[in-house]
Image (spheres, rainbow, N blue to C red):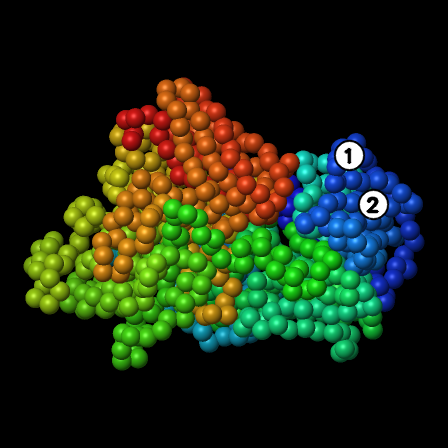
Amino acid sequence: MTKSWRSLVFCAVACVSVVGVENASTQSRGTEGSSTSPVTQLQCDMQGYKPATGLNAVLQENSLAVSWTGQDGAELRARYGVDGGTPVVRELAVRKQGGQWVSLGENLRPEYHVVSGIRRFSGQQGQPLTEIGQLTPERMEKEKWFVYRDAPLYIAGSAPAGRGGRGGGRGAGDGDSAPAGRGGRGGDGPIGGGPKPEDIRRASSSFKTTSCSVNTDGARLEVKFNGLSMGIFEGDLQFTAYRGTNLIRMDAIAKTHEPSVAYKYDAGLSGFSTATLARVTWNDVGGSPQHYQFGGVKNETRVPVRADNRVIVAEGRGGSLATFPPPHTFFWPRQVEVNLGYVWYRKDAATSFGMGIRQAEQEGVEQHLTTFPLYNAPPGTAQHMGAYFYASPLPAEATRQAVLSFTHGDTYKPVPGYKTMVNHLHLGITARLKASGSLDGESPEMSVVKSLGANIVGDSEFHGDPLRSDSGAGRFPDQADYGTVAAKLSDTDFLVTPWEEPSAYFGGHYNIFWPKVVLWSKTRQPDQQFTETDPKFGKVYHVGNAKEMQQLLDAEGGYWYHAHPRTKGTAGYPDAIFNEFFVKNDRYLGVAYKIGMGNDLSDIRSCEWRCFDAIDTMNNMITGTGLRPKYIIADIDSYQKAPEDDLYPTFPVTYIKLDRVPGATEDWSPILKSIREGTMFVTTGEILIRNYAVEGSGSKRTINAELEWTFPLEFVEVTWGDGKTVERQTIRTTDLAPHGTKRFTIPIDATGKSWVRFAAYDSAGNAAFAQPQWFNPANK
């Protein structure tokens, strides 16, 4: 896996350790917002600093003053210092264009809390690797970093941390039984048993800061303090300011040298005065405004807040300050999206408080407690643990709306000429409606998915149905009902498709896209033909092996792709079947992109090995064969949902080039045609590829990509292969302002190259990428 330096915004703040009872020292909590520690003479290395209009830093009066131009002409100022070896924000202030400076806080102290456990390889990964003869200690050591069925902080028998009782389709299961096929079910937890109390360690940040450094990187300015320690982690603390926005990112950048570390972190600032910021506000998960005016008694620990959109705002008479986590890299994959409270406040004294971001220690739904994998911290990797603040001269609600603009209000922004698709949802809607006595009924799951801005939903029911191995008599009526329910849940510009994750015969787990309702069984009895005419349902199919599975796809125009490549029930896949006829076939699309699987906050690219390396390898292998490229499709893979759930962080989306969404009773082939031709892009939502083309001929080609983004953009890159090797060109974009647009024109010498793909990442780790395209006409 490639590791490299990552800019501040994605620099997720370094790990600190502590959860549960807060043993924060007076150094980190303060008293009434004042500093009692001795002031340290500030020494800053300014060699990396370059003065720029609207982005300045100067040493003055034993502090470092950073000022920058924000959004809509606002100006911001942060003064940093060191008290008793601890970095402090001596002042954070903001003013409107032409207005007076308003202080939002003084002598603010950073705090981090980290909880770590042991990363373990799971039986779920072990089963498919055993079946293909590749389970070795060395393989287990590599693949444990991509585990899904792991919960390093959950001690069996302990009480769940939140509400329980909500199921999700098949509950805690997530693997298919594959009759007569490879890559069957693997739902086991960690090999060797689960966590023990002594495995779990907690720590809070402490500092022995002796110096700081200042670095200019394009339109951003980074201030770094040394001397951060937090249990098994050590490193630096960094603050980043971005010209053109009111954002401030705080990062702990820390390493551990211990093996097999999985961890979570909380972060924030303390020392705020209620005389300056009198209350904190948020919207609850029902969308209603809430506030707390610090009228209660002192808090001993951080107060988790289940805030809508993961934002809490401290408000005063002259301005407000929001805090929130990175929208996607802060989260690891789960089976449900229950909001576990990702922000916090804490009343520290009569007139002082702290606030920041947090992760829970356990899943909030009892059925899914064993899937809560945390972040990876491989030895020696610089983990970037980040928290955002947004300073504003405006009231709280205006500030909250400014924060929401970075995620388009947690929705998929419409792009002319494209329709949005989310895929791989195990919702169990058909079974619940049948149990109610009618197939007519409202679905809270589809309502919340529709509210995200999705136009097409690739459902994946029958993932764990008891009749999955039925040869047709029981399965066909259920499949027909599934098609009826999908049609009833569809609407104008909103299509629910009855697709499936059958995971039979090909190896690993995979999903199928159909252009219509198709009735088929995953087993075939000796007296059954491959295709038959059922007196009630008409044409049906019985499949008994991989060859017949391919025949079915060919006959009905279906396509398939591997879900969660190289992990879970697809561990070892698609690698194990690269040379199989059904992979070297245009009906095999490629692999899935799921946010957070194997989340490592030292990575600058998401899903690099599991997703991009897989398709790069396959595209090199099929160079010159005449086949179309292999692609990556956005994938979700989770269970039952509710309107109050927080879906956006773990819901990537595929934008498909499509004039209109077909109706429920129409032919869905236009969707599949666009997907197969690769006229689509995948995004976490913050970066949009509004137009994309590889133009030119011969050796002179040009990548033309029109991008729109919200968070400050980090880099764009072009990756290509020659049939044997893979290379890339990375173009840093830190000079560009946030909330921007730009047409990138990148010349490419296509000599000896086979294929090319394009991707873009922002400073928060959000991603967008177009699909690979061939240079060689033989592969069109």
Callout 1, which amino acid?
Pro
Q: Nearer the viewer, residue 609 or 78?
A: 78
Residue found 75% across the figure and 40% down from its top: 55
Residue at x 28%, y 26% (from the top left corner): 778
Q: In this picture, is 541 found above or below 640?
A: above
Mark 1 is surrounded, within 10 Å at the Cα level, by few (under 14), some (14 to 19) or many (20 or more) other residues, namely: few
Image check: 658 left or right of 451? left
Residue nearer the viewer, 184 or 78: 78
| Residue type at numbered disc 2 | Ala
The residue where tag 2 is placed is 65
Mark drawn on residue 51:
1
- Residue at left 24%, top 67%? 484
Q: Which mark is residue 349?
A: none
**Is residue 427 in view from this perspective?**
yes
Compared to 605, does 457 lie above or below?
Answer: below
678 or 358, nearer to the observer: 678
Quarter assignment of residue 590: top left
Q: Quadrant of residue 210?
A: top right
Tell me if residue 188 can be seen. Answer: no
Where's the C terminus, which quadrant? top left
Precedes in sequence: disc 2 or disc 1: 1
Task: Give how far across and how far down residue 439 sits, in percent.
Answer: 27, 74
For the point 71% across and 60% down, which residue is it?
Answer: 394
Q: Secondary structure at mark 2?
A: strand
